[in-house]
Image (spheres, grey):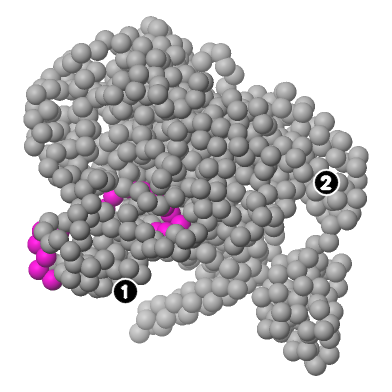
Amino acid sequence: MKLNSFDALYELHENLISLLDLRSDELQADEAKSGPRDILVCGGTGCHSAQSAEIITALREKIANAGLEDIKVIQTGCFGFCAQGPIVKVQPENIFYVQVKMEDLDEIINSHLIGGKAVERLLYTDPRTKEKQKHYLDMDFYKKQKRVALHNCGLIDPECIDEAIANGGYLAIAKVLSSMTQDDVIYEITASGLRGRGGAGFPTGRKWGFTKASVSDEKYFICNADEGDPGAFMDRSLLEGDPHGILEGMMIGGYAIGADTGIIYIRAEYPLAVYRLETAIAQAREYGLLGKNILGTDFNFDVQISLGAGAFVCGEETALIRSLEGNRGEPTRKPPFPAESGYRGKPSNVNNVETLANVASIILKGADWYKTIGTKGSKGTKVFALAGKVNNIGLVEVPMGTTLREIIFEIGGGIEGDKKFKAVQTGGPSGGVITEADLDTPIDFESLTSIGSMMGSGGMIVMDEDNDMVEIAKFYLEFTMDESCGKCTPCRIGTKRIYEMLETLIEQKGDLETLEKLDALCRTIRETALCALGQTAPNPVLSTMKYFPEEYERYAKGEVNKAYSIDPEKCIGCTKCARSCPVSCISGKVKEVHVIDVSKCIACGACFTACPFQAIVKP
Amino acid sequence: MQKTKFNMEILDSCKLRELDAFIEAEDNPQGRIINILHEAQKLFSYLPQELQLYIARKINMPAAKINGIVSFYSFFSQEPSGKYTISVCMGTACFVKGADAVLQAFRRELQLEEDQKTSADGLFSLRDVRCIGACGLAPVVTINDRIFGHVKEADVKGIIEEYRELAKQEVAEVAQ
């Protein structure tokens, strides 16, 4: 079926709205009420990894066997609450089940769907009050969130274009094509204050304006879905949960700059996202929403997918373009900017996934609405992947200006195991750590930079008292050293030297002079590297050195104890530790106290796990 | 100068035909080389130099350039991998929760030397991967398509034994 006119789309939308009748947050009917129901099961990668696909198949089968004809089971995108997955939500009564397992399904069907009584034990328990919570809007994790980019995730079936259209999908491109010029679109996006969500925060409307201004017979609109920041999964969840929203954002951008070809450059490590995008593209083509003469106008636009191959530097737009052209992904010097000369030498516009996920809402609700969210310099919301040593790991979307404390301690539910908060890392390998003292900073692009970190793409890793900051810095440098493309010397050799210095320190073979050299080298690389990857690579070191100088000094002075030891009071000489030690550094006879040779101990912890008497003492 | 000898015979002709069909469907094969290499790796499980040369001749591109691309991107492998590929996620979320210790535990269990990726019996390949985005399950390990969440060092031995057992059973079934 091709939609050949605006009216055909509007009519289809009207006819489909009822698909989502049962899914409103407000409609909190009683679970005792029988009748039609939608059961939403999270199909994001996190829940998928925890068997959500098997749960869906089994639920459908069991529901059919029980003769419950008016109950539908729908696979949705990510609900965000990954720590509690797999998540199953029953509508219209809004009952939110967490950590559902295959063996729980019969009880859900018998007790809830047939018996009309929600299964108490599968409800979320508030960690503070220990109360069971039925509805997700009551949970601390969701209370402070505002879903703009993620509005379809956890609501619609991302593999079904009809559900996307039912929820307003493709209405924004219809509005654009029926009533807006290219300049109108650029004006609206500029006025909204939307800034690039990939990390740099460049105003999206201005970027589009530059590309539109370049004169050429061919232009390209590129979506950067090469999300390489380790510990970040915002873009993946968006692509998996709302692929049509991303396509629509690309169409609107393509129209604004005058491009008829869209390209999505996506990581090959995201097979589910690739599959959902392919499905969405095929469906949109079938409806004539991609292709020639879209909605009966003379606007042509089609989208193709190009796979990345595991190179972090390809998230940098010039490297991405080189990679798209079939080359090693090495960045090029700017200018010329892609807006003048990009893919195949033609004007190209590169936007990040999350940026595009905001576009349709801005067009439909207007720049004035969007501007009401956020801070003076950073409008709208930001999606963060909250992970590490925090209770509520997951995907959160908050208005700009929310404080880190709210995110970590309210939405995130505080530190795991009641440990002490030490630092939070934002901006991935390009960013830095933020300590207790700055937790009340309202988040936006400028404020994070001013406290020595950066917004980055949205990875937020929480660390507790057990995390060693020098080890963390070394972890990031190992990453950037591996991922350096090798084109410019400061980055290729510099990152390796930094890594070696950190290694020397951790092996306690360095001294205070090593610290001085390390600091000087970091500053030199920051000034001289060719692209952002190299320029920001020293940040994790500089920021941990700034906030945790004592940890570096302890290593430099050789005061760090890394070896395990044995408590002679508790050891009974069972020999289990000695047998488990991979480097054979534990000696002792049967029924006699054992001893660890600290010079050989690699601190692997194998003895700690093996000892049945808790006689091994951690360093 | 001596030329390297390539034994093109090692390439399965059936798979090559599939690859040919894929390449012929592309209008700009040189520009789409990365996608072609993905397909080739899917078919052959890795990209031996012979295969890189085959593709080079097929799409009229210097083999050196193709090798440059293959060696640049970490997703491409020039070595055959074991029957089971163990991927330990080294994203930051997994790292702060002890993924490094899990990786070392696998190394010890499989008796891998530094830089050795595949176990001596050819059953297991061990690699560290960039964030797979299942941070809620950190630390995460995948073995082929199966995902293990919240893996502890102590679990490693059991996991490896399970797969060794599985391989034995398969051999026994084939023998029958």
> Vertically, is A103 above or below A593?
above
Q: Nearer the viewer, residue B127 or A449?
A: A449
- Quadrant where the image shows the N terminus of chain A: top left
Q: Which mark is residue A550?
A: 2
Give the magenta part as a residue range.
Answer: A66-85
Q: Can residue A495 be seen here?
A: no
Image x and y of residue A130, in percent = 46, 64
Q: Chain of mark 1?
A: A
Camera-side residue: A199 or B112?
Answer: A199
* Residue A172 coordinates in the image, percent (x, y): 24, 25
The x and y percentages for residue B75 are 50, 46
Q: State which tag comes first along the sequence, 1 or 2.
A: 1
Q: Residue at x 65, y 63 (%)?
A: B101
Q: Which residue is mark 1?
A: A103
The magenta stretch spans residue A78 = yes
Determine if marks 1 and 2 fall on one subunit.
Answer: yes
